[in-house]
Image (cartoon, rainbow, N blue to C red):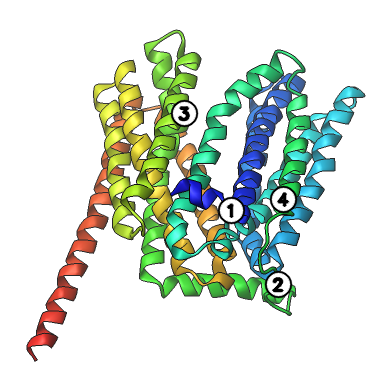
Amino acid sequence: MYRELWKNKNIRYYLAAGSVSRLGDLLSGMAFLFLAYDLTESSMLTTGMAVAEALPYLLFGLIGGVIADWLPKKKWLISLDLVRIPLILSVVVLYQLDMLTYAYLVTISFLIQSIGCFFNPAHRSVLPSITNVEERTIANSMYDTLTRGVTVLSPVVSIGLLNTYGAIHFFTFDALTYLISVLCLRQVSMEDRTQVSDKSISALFDSIKVIAVWIKTQPTIRRLFFFTFITVFFNTWVWEVGLLLALAEKSAQSEELYSILQGIFGGVVILTNIVLPYFIKKMKLFHYFIGGCLWGLGILYYGLLYEVTHFFIGCAIVGIGLPIAGLARVYLIQTLVPEEKLGRAFSFNAVLLYLSNTISLALYGFLVLFIQIQWLMIASGLAILSVSISGLLMKTVEASKLRGRLTINFLK
């Protein structure tokens, strides 16, 4: 199954471009934080760098989706990668000349992430153009497996670079990945046409309004986005910050344990991605809620038992549920959204995710001053589980009503 799809040149080069670019993004994201702290030795300014990496998605996320629907995607993606190469290399040059400043570093980080706002929805919306519906679940699984795989690989590469050339050459490596991405994208054959003729500012905002109105009329997509926002809100702090703080309470080797935990989590996610298409060919909202139930159950498990061993078991459960929900979400967007709206749909989804992340980090960061980490984990796991179960119940009730109407019509 996977072997046959890998023989497709378009899919092979598309996946290679996405995974190698993802590896470079991970490394440069770490390097921006490392250098910000080295230059300032200030936790506040380092946090400012993290904000500079997240803010563009809230500012330009929706605009990036519109542009992705307007322009020929292949040419647009290649152009964006080519622009990123000199930007990222300029940091290396100024560092070597001992002229690098924090302000310049923040500016480049902001610009790189802003370009990502335009690159990501265009790149994600290419896949439906080079696959059919039957191939889509497998292709999405391969894409997520490779991108998760480089997440597991990134600590190995980062440690190697840190021990040899230093953090600055994370940027050199990132520039190389952009070049490789360009070479791969050039090999992808697809119908690359301009979607619209009017590209004015007013048309841009009209396009955003059109996708918002369209989503309101689509119950499945609307429900998918709503439940995703809620689930991610309850997950973000617990996963990104809470686990590390909990490990620090339990062990003096919290950072090492957290790295190992992330590696095990990534491995379970990859295994789930590989196995899932053998059992599910076409994903539904039902599968999204099943994934959400496992996701919430994993968090609830390690929150209730709250020991290092159970953190690993709970995260393994999350590693099964999260990719099921994630693959279902992507499949539903690709399948239910018209091709001319795909870029905007993916960017709308991304903006919701980043908004949910931001609110979660801010609110939980305040709550942890008064509430124990364990109780925040338990509450979050229960919330995700409850939301997912309610979604399943809603689907069951709707299905029952539909069967009832069909029976009545048949009797008539």
User: Residue drawn at (66%, 56%), measured in percent from left and top?
Assistant: 60
Q: Nearer the viewer, residue 120 or 130?
A: 130
Q: Is residue 392 left or right of residue 250?
A: left
User: Residue drawn at (43%, 15%), measured in percent from left and top?
Assistant: 248
Label 4 Cα neighbours within 10 Å, binned few <14 / some 14-19 / many ≥20: many
The residues tagged by marks 3 and 1 sit, at their Cα atoms, a distance apart of: 36 Å
Mark 4 highlights which residue? 115
Tell me whether the residue at label 4 lies in contact with that at label 2, contact meaning CB atoms closer than 8 angstroms. no
Q: Nearer the viewer, residue 306 or 397?
A: 397
210 over 293 or under it: above or below: below
The residues tagged by marks 4 and 1 sit, at their Cα atoms, a distance apart of: 23 Å
The type of residue carrying mark 3 is: Val
The type of residue carrying mark 2 is: Arg
Regarding mark 2 in the picture, which secondary structure is present there? loop
Q: Which disc is residue 193 wearing?
A: 2
The type of residue carrying mark 1 is: Ile
The residues tagged by marks 2 and 3 sit, at their Cα atoms, a distance apart of: 43 Å
Tell me whether the residue at label 2 lies in contact with that at label 1, contact meaning CB atoms closer than 8 angstroms. no
The type of residue carrying mark 4 is: Ile
Tell me whether the residue at label 4 lies in contact with that at label 1, contact meaning CB atoms closer than 8 angstroms. no
